[in-house]
Amino acid sequence: MSHIQIPRGLMELLQGYTVEVLRRQPPDLVDFAVDYFTRLREARAQVSSPPASPPSGSQGLEPSPGVVADENEEIQSEDDEDLEVPIPGRFDRRVSVCAEAYNPDEEEEDTDPRVIHPKTDLQRCRLQESCKDILLFKNLDQEQLSQVLDAMFERTVKVDEHVIDQGDDGDNFYVIERGTYDILVTKDNQTRSVGQYDNRGSFGELALMYNTPRAATIVATSEGSLWGLDRVTFRRIIVKNNAKKRKMFESFIESVPLFKSLEVSERLKIVDVIGEKTYKDGERIITQGDKADCFYIIESGEVSILIRSKTKANKDGGNVEVEIARCHKGQYFGELALVTNQPRAASAYAVGDVKCLVMDVQAFERLLGPCMDIMKRNVSHYEEQLVKVFGSSMDLVDPGQ
């Protein structure tokens, strides 16, 4: 079972179907699959039959967003023309980068030569500074991290430059050194901004991890500098390391109540972007008033949540911190500031040794949309706790003070 043979052509076959689903957004995936694979079989039969002039619309027309209609023959014939079905002969060629099979569980020797982009001492220092908070790198050992840094290359960008485009194959993973960038998603011919990067963060990992087309377009809104990592090195080191991490964290993430409403594939993506941090007894994890940059799930141990009281002062005249909650294994904290886009409203301290799974703000916004309603409900829950402790939900020091 550890070396399952993937049939030749399977990855490209499924990729073709997946791309069409993403482009057309059909309301019924089963009906769409029946229609898609029926046409694929017909196309194969045509290839096997004596040569004939190709039917119109079979030369890879770019499909327009829409749904597969099955209400009447007229609408059906229109969809026939722009449903792109792969020609069976393509399976004999080299597949696109998004369809290449890669099993990170297979323990095989690395035969590809290491990629090394020479850097000055100053470049190396800048790169290390840019990468120090990248969660994907947190679980790498020193040798793996050194190989990743060696393979990374610098890319400067200008205003309005497209770094990656939605629908393209994934070629590189990027870490931001400086600059601001818009995250744009196009659906039903409408393009909208779903987020921004501001002089920090990383992007481009999902297409490389899952062999899928780029899910969004990243456009520079200022001049900037990026560090890129090629897909071969990324998959050889990051994806393989992530497969080991997935085995460790998958069952735990599945047990977290917040994620019960997510699909299995959505939970797996969370596993792939989280990091792990440990804290000693009494160590402060987050500080009231600080800018929010991460979301925390307690893997083991206990965390005390405290806020500064407006009415209670210590002997030095400062505001006393009062405990309002205790969080335990499987519970989460740090989401309130991310949901409300405000500074941290409370501080969090480790009670005994604590181990947390950590997700950065960009991954939080990108992957936890389905959980946002649940987390917004916690805002009123926190207010109830404050009323219970202080008699008023407004009996707080301004978080920014």
Image (spheres, helix red, strand yellow):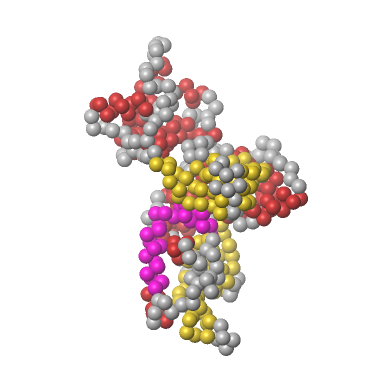
Answer with the quarter of the image where residue 26 lies: top left
Where does residue 90 sit, x and y in percent of width and height? 48, 24
On screen, residue 182 versus residue 18, left or right, reads right
Q: Residue furthest bottom?
A: 315
Q: Is residue 175 above or below residue 58?
A: below
For this rendering, which residue is in front, 373 or 326? Answer: 373
Name which residue lies at 29% across and 25% down.
77
For this rendering, which residue is in front, 95 or 75? Answer: 75
Q: Is residue 339 above or below residue 272?
A: below
Name which residue lies at 49% across and 85% down.
312
**Could you tell me how many numbered marks the image carries?**
0
Where does residue 160 sit, x and y in percent of width and height? 55, 43
Answer with the quarter of the image where residue 376 lies: bottom left
Q: Main secondary structure of the magenta part?
A: helix
Q: Residue furthest left?
A: 72
Stretch in magenta: 358-383
Residue 361 is one of the magenta-drawn residues: yes
Where does residue 389 sit, x and y in percent of width and height? 42, 81
Where does residue 46 sit, x and y in percent of width and height? 38, 17
Answer with the quarter of the image where residue 52 lies: top left
Q: Is residue 372 above or below residue 212?
A: below
Q: Is residue 213 visible to us here? A: no
Residue 205 is one of the magenta-drawn residues: no
On screen, residue 83 versus residue 323, left or right, reads left
Name which residue lies at 39% across and 73% down.
383
Q: Is residue 86 visible to us here? A: yes
